[in-house]
Amino acid sequence: MAEDEQTVSPSPRASGMFAEPLKEKRFPTTAVAIASAAIVILVVFLLMLGHRKGGADADPNLPQAAATYAPNLVISNIQLSESESISGGKVSYVDGHIANRGPATVSGITAQVSFPNDQGAAPQMMTVPLNLIRMREPYIDTQPVSAAPLAPGAEADFRLIFEGVSDSWNNQPPSIRLVRVSTR
């Protein structure tokens, strides 16, 4: 009986002359190349932006004026103290007196402080904003220089606050260098 025989047609994925070729899964090299190029461009842009703002002062009109104003600020009467923070760490304080002997009003100061050691290693360097002491009772309260700018001839007490000073610090007075001074 010829009616009982069925003709089976090959499926489209079957092997043979009329079969569809299998698509290979490939690594998306074009997409990876574009993403890599975008990341490189972003990193270069951020580095260039950082170098442009990284000068002595962010004001492009006075790029060196702020750095050259630091010698007009006289620091004296350095005193050291420390306390334990709420989290159990040690907080170190460097208190002192600063006088503005220059012709401009100072609205911001950043200090770089070098903590020496007796082990022959390089000193630990930390950079922090200089804060003025606003009041001493019932506790020492500080404020940024921008809250009470130092006019020409003005003097004030200040405090530098440090967390994480190395245990190798020999507790001798650190050297203080003013690395950024904002004036107006």
Image (cartoon, rainbow, N blue to C red):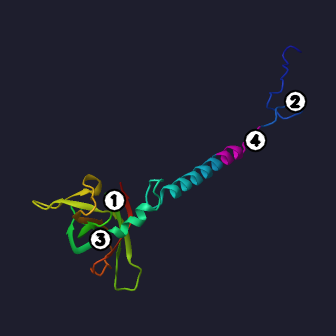
Report if the CB atoms under discs 2 and 3 are less than 8 Å apart: no
Residue at the (37%, 85%) spot, across then down: 119
Could you say where residue 49 lies in the image, as x and y percent from the top left? 53, 53
- Give the SS element for disc 4: loop
- The vertical placement of 51 against 176, above or below, is above
From the image, tell me which residue sits under label 4.
24
From the image, tell me which residue sits under label 2.
18
Q: Start and end of the magenta stretch? A: 23-34
Residue 112 seen in the current view: no
- Report, in whole angstroms, how far the alpha carbon at label 2 lies from the one at label 3: 91 Å
Could you say where residue 29 lies in the image, as x and y percent from the top left? 71, 47
Q: Which mark is residue 104?
A: 1
Locate residue 140: give its quadrant: bottom left
Q: Which mark is residue 74?
A: 3
- Report, in whole angstroms, how far the alpha carbon at label 4 lies from the one at label 1: 72 Å
Q: Nearer the viewer, mark 2 or mark 3?
A: 3
- Report, in whole angstroms, how far the alpha carbon at label 1 lies from the one at label 3: 14 Å
Does label 1 or label 2 sit earlier along the sequence? 2
Residue 167 seen in the current view: yes
Does label 3 or label 4 sit earlier along the sequence? 4
